[in-house]
Structure formats: structure tokens, C-alpha cells
Image (cartoon, rainbow, N blue to C red):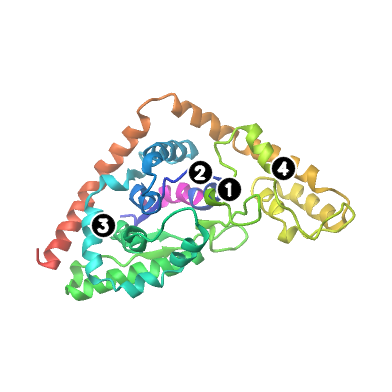
């Protein structure tokens, strides 16, 4: 039997280039190599959007349509909604009994997100227990592998510690929960963070809806062109006659994702020699992005014309997922002694 792999996304907004060139491309490959389970993490979204949850359901539907239009096949993988699997919440409760608060406080993203996302109240218990919920998502499905980037390894290791402590506390033996292992995907350039590609946004920071620097894969051609013209370039290149460094240019890094190698080599050379300007480069990036996403947008429009399609996909995914989750939670109840 194939190993089981699991990953999920929070439905907090439209998918952007960082999602497309990161975990989504990895998901497409994994659905053929593993028993793949992909979930829309609406409870995770609620941990930060608890004051304004109205858009979560809409973004959930849009995410399912984006995934299928991108190439995920519901016949090959299970696509489901986190909140359709109530066993996840029960397992989180059991994990909350064995997880020290100090473990959650040391989570790398906890204080970082509180500092960087200032427009939301992240002092709630749900956000604090986010890593334990993440562990419950994985453990409830007995997932052996989780695709992560190197910067996410501490999160997965915390999950492994939680599972290990649960198994030890309740003397699980061979009935214990699986300690998930990382699945590091190597990119073409040898990186091992392809599962979470750090695609720069228009302002040079990591592309994120929260930062307002994202190009969304569902943007119209005109929207893509407008945003591409806002891309930050090498800050040291103030005039056309100044030589640039493509290695630190966000515009150049994004263009490498969609353009042919020979074209990128030409832009690299002329930038270093100061024989071309950044404005023509931005225009070229815009047209390459429009071309790259044309087929996806055609498929996405076709799915939009099928009312109820996302609901059908999620129901089919839950049907595949619930029996596994139920078997796992019954095992955990027995171990705990309930």
C-alpha cells in the first residue's frame, strides 16, 4: 500500500503565486505517488478570523475550485473540509491534556504572527493551541508523511513530540498514533523548501494576503499587469545606468518561475551590465504571468459554471475520510480509558 500523505490550507483568501509555486505544485505530484488527503482548514482559519468569520465558507468553496482547476483529481485524492471531521476536535481535546503550555509558547510562528499581523486579535486560546490542532489533523488520519519546507520542520517536530507524549502517557505500544515524518520536496535548484516556496511579493517580503503584496492566480490579466508594475527591484539600482544584482531582485526571482531559462539569462546579463531597464522587465513579467495562468483560468471558469460542484467534492472527500478518523478516535478513546 502507498504511504499516506496529508496537508491542508487555511481558507483566508484567494490563492496567490506563493501557494501556486509552493505547496500546490507539490500536492499535484504527491497525488500520484501517495495516498493523498488534502483538507481545507476552516477551523484553523477561525483561530485568526474569529471576529469576522463570514468569508470562510466562501473562501472554502473557492479553494476547492482552485485546487481542482489546478489539477487535483478528486478520484485520486481526498479533498475534504476540516470541520466535517468532528473527530479532529475530540483528538485535540486529548492532546490538550498531555501538551505543556510551554511547548506551545515556543512555537516559532506564535509570537512572530502576533507581531506582524497587527490588525487581528490573536490573544485567543484557539490561536494559542494552533499547533496541537495541526497535530490532531495529521494524527487523526494516521498520516505517515507531511510535506513541509525546512522552515516548517520545528512545527512538525512539535507535533511529533505531542504524539510521542500521548503514546507514552497512555502506554499505547503498537496501537499508538503514528509519528509523522517530514516530506521535503527538492526544487529544481536543489532547495529542500519547495513545499513552502518563499515567493517574494511586490514589496519584496514573502508574498502574503496579509501584507497586501500578492498577485492572485485568479486575478484578471489587467490586474496582473497592474500589480507586476509595482514590483520592487534591486534597491541599489536607482538609475538606468546603475548595474543591478538579479540575485536580490524580487522581480527577477518571480520571473524565473514562469519564463524560459534563456530569457531569464538575457535579463540577468543586461541587468548586471545596465543595458536594460526595470520597467520593460516588469512588462515582460506581466505578459509571462498572464500566459502562464491562461489555461488555469479557463478551467476555473468552467468549474464556476457548475453550481454545487465544490460541495460534491467535499462530500466525497468526507466519505473517504470519516471511516479512517472514526477508527483512529475509537482507538484513542480506548487508550485513554474512556
The residue positioned 43% from the left and 65% from the top of the image is 110
User: Closer to the observer: label 4 or label 2?
Assistant: 4
Magenta residues, start to end: 25-38
Residue 223 point in image, percent of width and height: 63, 35
Residue 240 point in image, percent of width and height: 87, 51
Q: How many badges with numbers are in the image? A: 4
Q: Secondary structure at mark 4?
A: loop
User: Closer to the observer: label 1 or label 3?
Assistant: 1
Q: Which residue is mark 3?
A: 140
Q: CA distance from mark 2 to mark 1?
A: 13 Å
Q: CA distance from mark 4 to mark 2?
A: 20 Å
The answer to whether 186 is drawn above or below residue 104 in the figure is above
From the viewer's perspective, tell me whether residue 44 is left or right of residue 304.
left
The answer to whether 266 is drawn above or below residue 223 in the figure is below
N-term-proximal mark, 4 vs 2: 2
Residue 80 is one of the magenta-drawn residues: no
Q: Which residue is mark 2?
A: 15
Q: Which mark is residue 229?
A: 4
How packed is label 4: few (under 14 Cα within 10 Å), some, or many (20 or more)?
some
N-term-proximal mark, 4 vs 1: 1
The residue positioned 17% from the left and 74% from the top of the image is 171
Q: Which mark is residue 212?
A: 1
Closer to us: 188 or 319: 319
Residue 234: image quadrant is bottom right
How packed is label 2: few (under 14 Cα within 10 Å), some, or many (20 or more)?
many
Amino acid at each position: 500500500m502507498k504511504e499516506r500523505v496529508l496537508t491542508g490550507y487555511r481558507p483566508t483568501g484567494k490563492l496567490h503565486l506563493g501557494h501556486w509555486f509552493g505547496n500546490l505544485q507539490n500536492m499535484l505530484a504527491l497525488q500520484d505517488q501517495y495516498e493523498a488527503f488534502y483538507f481545507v482548514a476552516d477551523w484553523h482559519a477561525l483561530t485568526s478570523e474569529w471576529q469576522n468569520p463570514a468569508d470562510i465558507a466562501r473562501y472554502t468553496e473557492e479553494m476547492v475550485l482552485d485546487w481542482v482547476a489546478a489539477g487535483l483529481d478528486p478520484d485520486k485524492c481526498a479533498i475534504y473540509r476540516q470541520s466535517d471531521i468532528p473527530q479532529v476536535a475530540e483528538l485535540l481535546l486529548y492532546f490538550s491534556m498531555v501538551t505543556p503550555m510551554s511547548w506551545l509558547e515556543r512555537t516559532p510562528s506564535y509570537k512572530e504572527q502576533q507581531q506582524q499581523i497587527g490588525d487581528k486579535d490573536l490573544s485567543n486560546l484557539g490561536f494559542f493551541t494552533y499547533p496541537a490542532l495541526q497535530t490532531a489533523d495529521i494524527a487523526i488520519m494516521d498520516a505517515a508523511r507531511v510535506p513541509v519546507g525546512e522552515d516548517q520542520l520545528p512545527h512538525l517536530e512539535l507535533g511529533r513530540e505531542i504524539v510521542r507524549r500521548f503514546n507514552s502517557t497512555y502506554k499505547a505500544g503498537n496501537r499508538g498514533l503514528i509519528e509523522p515524518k517530514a516530506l521535503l520536496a527538492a526544487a529544481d535548484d536543489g532547495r529542500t523548501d519547495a513545499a513552502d516556496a518563499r515567493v517574494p511579493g511586490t514589496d519584496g517580503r514573502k508574498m502574503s494576503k496579509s501584507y497586501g503584496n500578492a498577485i492572485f492566480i485568479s486575478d484578471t490579466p489587467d490586474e496582473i499587469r497592474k500589480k507586476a508594475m509595482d514590483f520592487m527591484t534591486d534597491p541599489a539600482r536607482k538609475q538606468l545606468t546603475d548595474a543591478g544584482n538579479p540575485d536580490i531582485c524580487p522581480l527577477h526571482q518571480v520571473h524565473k518561475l514562469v519564463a524560459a531559462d534563456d530569457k531569464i539569462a538575457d535579463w540577468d546579463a543586461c541587468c548586471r551590465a545596465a543595458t536594460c531597464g526595470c520597467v520593460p522587465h516588469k512588462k515582460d513579467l506581466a505578459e509571462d504571468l498572464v500566459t502562464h495562468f491562461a489555461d488555469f483560468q479557463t478551467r476555473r471558469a468552467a468549474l464556476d459554471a457548475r453550481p454545487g460542484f465544490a460541495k460534491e467534492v467535499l462530500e466525497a472527500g468526507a466519505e473517504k475520510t470519516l471511516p479512517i478518523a472514526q477508527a483512529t478516535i475509537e482507538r484513542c478513546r480506548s487508550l485513554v480509558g474512556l
